[in-house]
Image (tube, rainbow, N blue to C red):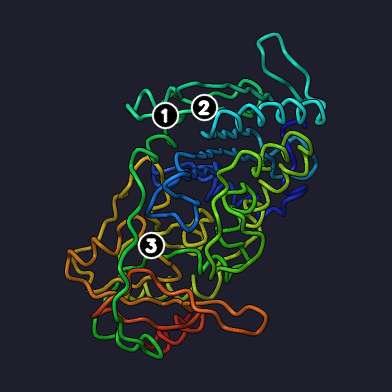
Amino acid sequence: MFLPHPVIDSLTPEQVRMWDAYFSPEAGGQRRPAIEEGIWRRTQDPANRELSGWTEDESGRRRVVHYRLHYGLDRTQPMERLVLEELYLYVSWLAPATEIAAHRRDLDQWLTDGRWKPTDDGSWRRGDLHATITEHTIHPQDERADRDTPEGFTSVDVTIRSEDYTLTRAARNLPWDVLAGGMRVKEERGNPTYANDLTGLLDHLPFVVEAGCGTSIEAGIPPLHWLHEVYRVTTRTGNDLTQGYAFTLSPAADILIKEILTDTVRKVDDMVSMFRSVVLAEPTSAHRALKALHDAGHMVGPVATHNFDRLFARAGLQEAFMRRYDQRTPHMPFPDDAKALLVIGLHADRRQVQARARERGLPIFYLDPEGVTENGVYKPYLIEGAREGDVVVRSEATPALLHLAELLSVNV
């Protein structure tokens, strides 16, 4: 496995210009769009017993995943190409000592099967990638947090990174800081009002927008749960959004590290597939409709986006990026003249944008299909925190926003 690793073999001149404009620079000082990052921490708790398998006699397991992928343009070829420049993947398990010992033997076998070579410092190398394995009786991060280790449990960490790649201490601590923040408490569903379209929003102009992955899915980008499959966060293996999926908490059931150690190139291709689709995607009519509504003064402020695809920016709108791990409630600049919040394609208020809108007295309108059609059967997937006084329009973003623009005599 050698880096840089090709992601898109040749880019058009327009794609190169797009990359230079929207991915190379920092996005308003908030983040580096050319870095894809994800964190998952899964634990056993009475509150998540159905997914974690928690019982009085079965508790204490933990799995932490943290990855960073750095992308860039390779300009040494006749045609510029998008490449993966740096890779970092960290997985930590806490489980009964017998399971950790068995997993350690599996790791040794996978290193052999994948033809990784031992190095003088105790790590393993395959091309430009290095792998380290560290076992702990008490995990240093548990000591740091003064967190007890269940009796009879030990832990093992696996780190796979590109050669000479380093993370700051703050970056290495990010997944553990997220863990220390505790489980997110789900909102209670109320009784929102349902409407056929966004006509009710006409009485609350101008509005602010918060957007989830709905607009990105309409642009051809996989939903974020695709990453759950790539990084084996749950047992999900399909496109079914409406069921709960058990957490991957047993080391023996976790095939992520096996995949990257024994079939490295194929697994890395899986890991970069989301970002490939991001770069190939184009803003949709929904993005363009919001830009037209913004230009006409009916929408104000930046889009509070949870998407790293930069499609709103490419449509000419400012973005306030919400999907970050260093802040639980990233700053959202609500303009003083905002009269409502329109939430598009977002299942839950994970970054408390809606909570802050409620504190300001803003009515909330949701634009969301609230379900998926599987094998010709519609299955509901309700907005988690919609409540009395809110308005829900069950629709995809594009037709509803184009209709709103038409109601306001705005050309898109």
Residue 307 at x, y = what percent? 48, 57
Residue 126, placed above or below residue 70: above
Task: Tell which circle, 2 or 1, labels the residue nearer the N-terminal end.
Answer: 1
Name the residue that disc number 2 marks. 154
Q: Can residue 39 be seen in this view?
A: yes
Left or right of 261 on screen, residue 24:
left
Name the residue that disc number 3 marks. 303
Residue 300, placed above or below residue 260: below
Q: Give the CA separation, mark 3 to mark 2.
A: 44 Å
In front: 361, or 150? 150
Q: Which amino acid does label 1 sit on?
A: Thr
Q: Which residue is drawn at 80% across and 41% down?
A: 78
The quadrant in which residue 156 appears is top right
Q: Give the CA separation, mark 1 to mark 3.
A: 42 Å
Task: Tell which circle, 3 or 2, labels the residue nearer the N-terminal end.
Answer: 2
Of circles 3 and 2, which is in front? 2
Q: Residues within 10 Å of mark 3 (few under 14, many from 20)?
A: many
In front: 1, or 337? 1
Q: What residue type is labelled 2?
A: Thr
Q: Which amino acid does label 3 sit on?
A: Val
Quick one: SS at disc 2? strand
Name the residue that disc number 1 marks. 149
Residue 264 - label: none
Left or right of 43 on screen, residue 339:
left
Q: Are marks 2 and 1 in contact (CB under 8 Å)?
A: yes
Q: Residue furthest top?
A: 120
